[in-house]
């Protein structure tokens, strides 16, 4: 089970970093660079996650997924989307087939 307390503490820190001086932390600097830089970092971490999965190294995969989740949370925070919003969407989708969920969104892919 996910420790939502740690996720909420991280989210609180990320929100604080949005208004911090860019040179005060890695995340503050990333926010100062803007959405494109944050998105590039999410894409980079997603690619590294895929490579770790293909390598079959469980611990490496855990490290890369953690980096991906972290940077995804940076992106979400940029748009004032919280962890509770994502959890609510998971709850909404619970018990729904992927095919039906995509139909409900009008997604044909």
Image (cartoon, grey):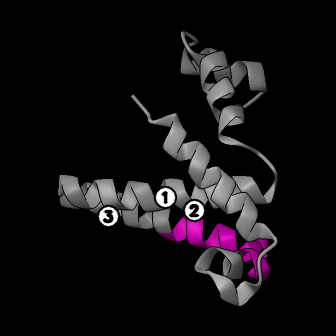
* Cβ atoms at labels 2 and 1 below 8 Å apart: yes
Mark 3, secondary structure of its residue: helix
- Residue under label 3, please give it: 51
Of marks 3 and 1, the one in the foreground:
1
- Residue under label 2, please give it: 71
Mark 2, secondary structure of its residue: helix
Location of residue 29 (image quadrant): bottom right
The residue that appears at 62% across and 73% down in the rendered structure is 40
Q: Which residues are magenta?
A: 31-44
Return the disc, 2 or 3, that comes first in the chain's sequence: 3
Location of residue 43 (image quadrant): bottom right
* Cβ atoms at labels 2 and 3 below 8 Å apart: no
- Between the residue at mark 2 and the residue at mark 3, the CA separation in whole angstroms equals 17 Å
Mark 1, secondary structure of its residue: helix
The residue that appears at 77% across and 68% down in the rendered structure is 18
The overriding secondary structure of the stretch rendered in magenta is helix
Q: Position of residue 100 (x, y in %)?
A: 64, 15
- Residue under label 1, please give it: 68
Q: Position of residue 106 (x, y in %)?
A: 78, 26
Can you tell which mark lies on residue 105? none
| Relative to 5, residue 96 above or below | above
Q: Residues within 10 Å of mark 1 (few under 14, many from 20)?
A: many
- Between the residue at mark 2 and the residue at mark 1, the CA separation in whole angstroms equals 5 Å
Return the disc, 3 or 1, that comes first in the chain's sequence: 3
């Amino acid at each position: 089970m996910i420790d939502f307390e740690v996720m909420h503490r991280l989210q609180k820190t990320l929100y604080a970093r949005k208004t911090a001086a860019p040179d005060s932390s890695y995340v503050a600097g990333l926010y100062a660079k803007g959405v494109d830089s944050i998105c590039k970092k999410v894409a980079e971490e997603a690619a590294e996650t895929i490579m770790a999965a293909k390598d079959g190294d469980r611990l490496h995969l855990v490290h890369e997924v953690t980096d991906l989740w972290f940077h995804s949370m940076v992106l979400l925070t940029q748009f004032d989307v919280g962890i509770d919003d994502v959890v609510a969407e998971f709850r909404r989708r619970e018990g729904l087939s992927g095919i039906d969920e995509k139909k409900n969104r009008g997604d044909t892919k």
